Image (cartoon, grey):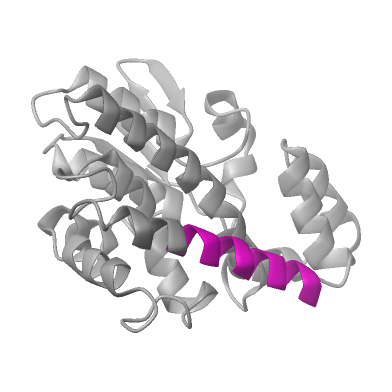
């Protein structure tokens, strides 16, 4: 049995939900509310000591980190392969997996700073409640982010500028890669595209919308629209009971 603990429409949750849907795999969906800090609950931390989403449980085995989850699913369920057979192309997929992990940083700065979601929930806390929240965060980097947006005055203009520069660098990398084929790793749709599409979608929406335009990144825009039109991706991005369950 496959179970996925996820937060619906967060970028990393989308990455693994796309793979499950592309492969046509049945799974039990467990929604984890980040706004309610359910990812820091003791029971969840027993599954994922890092307190992050998503988490995959396959017949009792726990797999964490969305990029690792996606590679695991492709290895265990190879009938619909999402990695090319050619070793050089597979190496490109691994490079894009690394870039996808790096792409999280700029997205997180914007996401944690906006008016909704986990940032809003954290900023609504004060005193002992806020201190208890910060104390429960397992990862030092995430603890520092929450401390910064609640007690440190938020991210500086220099930090936002650095995040936008990093995002722009990744957009440029994608634009260059797409000169060699219709997909990021060459001729075939792969984990490279799946791991990047949630971030590139966010980049176009709100991180660096001035960079992801037909004028500045025509290949990226065409690629992004084409990936977003895939049925599995449409289903993943849609608001549904899975992505926004009833209270």
Report whether residue 155 is seen. Answer: no
Residue 99 pos. (x, y %): 48, 45
The quarter holding residue 239 reads bottom left
The quarter holding residue 54 reads top left
Name the foreground residue: 84 vs 104.
84
Residue ID at (52%, 26%)? 47
In the image: residue 14, left or right of residue 28: right
Vertically, is 85 above or below 33? above
Vertically, is 116 above or below 146? below
Residue 65 pos. (x, y %): 48, 33
The quadrant of the image that shows the N terminus is top left
Q: Give the range drawn in magenta.
A: 155-171
The secondary structure that dominates the magenta segment is helix
Q: Is residue 159 one of those drawn in magenta? A: yes
Residue ID at (11%, 58%)? 231
Residue ID at (39%, 32%)? 94
Report whether residue 227 is seen. Answer: yes
Residue 159 pos. (x, y %): 76, 67
The quarter holding residue 140 reads top right
Residue 176 pos. (x, y %): 36, 58
């Amino acid at each position: 049995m496959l179970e996925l603990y996820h937060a619906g429409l967060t970028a990393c949750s989308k990455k693994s939900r796309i793979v499950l849907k592309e492969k046509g795999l049945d799974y039990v969906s467990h929604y984890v509310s980040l706004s309610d800090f359910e990812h820091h609950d003791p029971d969840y931390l027993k599954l994922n000591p890092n307190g992050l989403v998503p988490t995959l449980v396959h017949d009792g085995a726990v797999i964490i980190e969305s990029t690792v989850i996606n590679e695991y699913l492709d290895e265990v369920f190879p009938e619909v392969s999402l990695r090319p057979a050619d070793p050089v192309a597979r190496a490109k997929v691994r490079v894009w997996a690394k870039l996808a992990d790096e792409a999280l940083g700029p997205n997180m700065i914007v996401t944690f700073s906006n008016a909704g979601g986990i940032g809003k929930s954290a900023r609504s806390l004060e005193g002992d409640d806020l201190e208890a929240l910060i104390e429960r965060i397992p990862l030092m980097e995430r603890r520092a982010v929450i401390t910064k947006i609640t007690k440190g005055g938020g991210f500086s203009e220099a930090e936002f500028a650095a995040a936008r520069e990093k995002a722009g660098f990744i957009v440029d990398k994608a634009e260059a890669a797409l000169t060699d084929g219709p997909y990021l790793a060459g001729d075939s749709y792969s984990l490279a595209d799946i791991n990047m599409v949630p971030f590139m979608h966010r980049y176009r929406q709100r991180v660096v919308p001035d960079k992801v335009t037909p004028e500045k990144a025509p290949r990226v825009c065409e690629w992004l629209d084409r990936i977003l039109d895939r049925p599995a991706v449409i289903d993943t991005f849609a608001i549904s009971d899975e992505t926004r369950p009833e209270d």
